[in-house]
Image (spheres, helix red, strand yellow):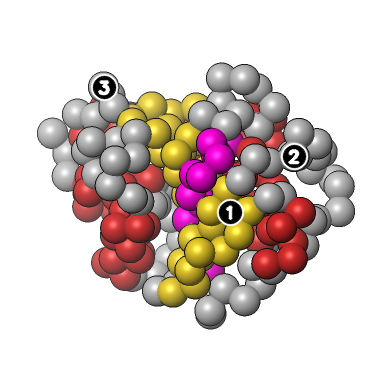
Amino acid sequence: MASLESVLAEAQRIGLIGPGSLEDSIEHSNRFAAAVPVGVCRVVDIGAGGGLPGLVIGACRPEVSLLLVDRRGRACDFLRRSVGSLGWSQRVSVMEADVALLGRVPETAGQFDVVTARGFGPPGLVAELGLPLLRPGGLMIVSVVGGGETWSSEGLAILNARVLTRKDGLVLVEAGVCPSRYPRARRSPRVF
């Protein structure tokens, strides 16, 4: 069985994880895992890429059912192989899909307790694509630069969501009932 570190090192080697300290990236991903509330059942990592933070959450939180979503076939192929080599196929799955479509499909819309995103896109886009996947009261955990001030309380209110905390390079957003008009087409102006 492969180790998590060897899987992530391979992801970095083939360009699915950017350059820089892999140790620092894993530590940052550990903060995602720590932010997932106890008792959570279903977690989805959008824009899963090379497996950060998704695979780290899988390692730290074996009690959760985890879905890794990316629209790039190359990333999904890597993630499927990695999940198999880690022995996690019973609790971690991979889906090749455009997240913009998942918020409109009954099998995924409103079905998750937690959505995670790291390096996915600007705040308004991440919120609009991720929040429709959450059940009311669910939590979105997003990596941010600085203090997360770009996560506008006013913008999130449009999506019936609110910031719970901004700390440790993460913003935690609580979802309400997301209006049915979201997510919109990718070319729509951002909510914020």
165 left or right, relative to 21: right
In the rendered image of this protein, does residue 87 appear above or below residue 40? above
Amino acid type at circle 3 is: Gln
Disc 1 marks which amino acid?
Answer: Phe
Q: Position of residue 66 (x, y in %)?
A: 37, 34
Question: Residue shown at 68%/50% (left/top)?
Answer: 160
- As drawn, the residue found furthest toward the left would be 1
Percent position (x, y) of residue 59? 23, 45
In this view of the protein, which residue sits in the foreground, 15 or 86? 86
Quadrant the C terminus occupies? bottom right
Question: Badge 1 is on which residue?
Answer: 120
Q: For the magenta stretch, what is the residue range?
A: 133-144
Regarding residue 98, the answer to whether it shows in the image is: no
First-in-chain label (2 vs 1): 1
Reply yes or no: does residue 82 show up in magenta.
Answer: no
Q: Name the side, left or right, on which 54 lies relative to 16.
A: left
Vertical comparison of 118 with 75: above or below: below
Looking at the magenta stretch, what is its main secondary structure?
A: strand
Task: Choose between 140 and 57: the one closer to the eye.
Answer: 140
Which numbered tag is attached to residue 179?
Answer: 2
Q: x, y percentage for residue 5?
A: 22, 52
Q: Which residue is mark 3?
A: 90
Q: Would you say the residues marked 3 and 2 are in contact, meaning their CB atoms lie under 8 Å apart? A: no
Distance from the alpha carbon under mark 2 to that under mark 1: 22 Å
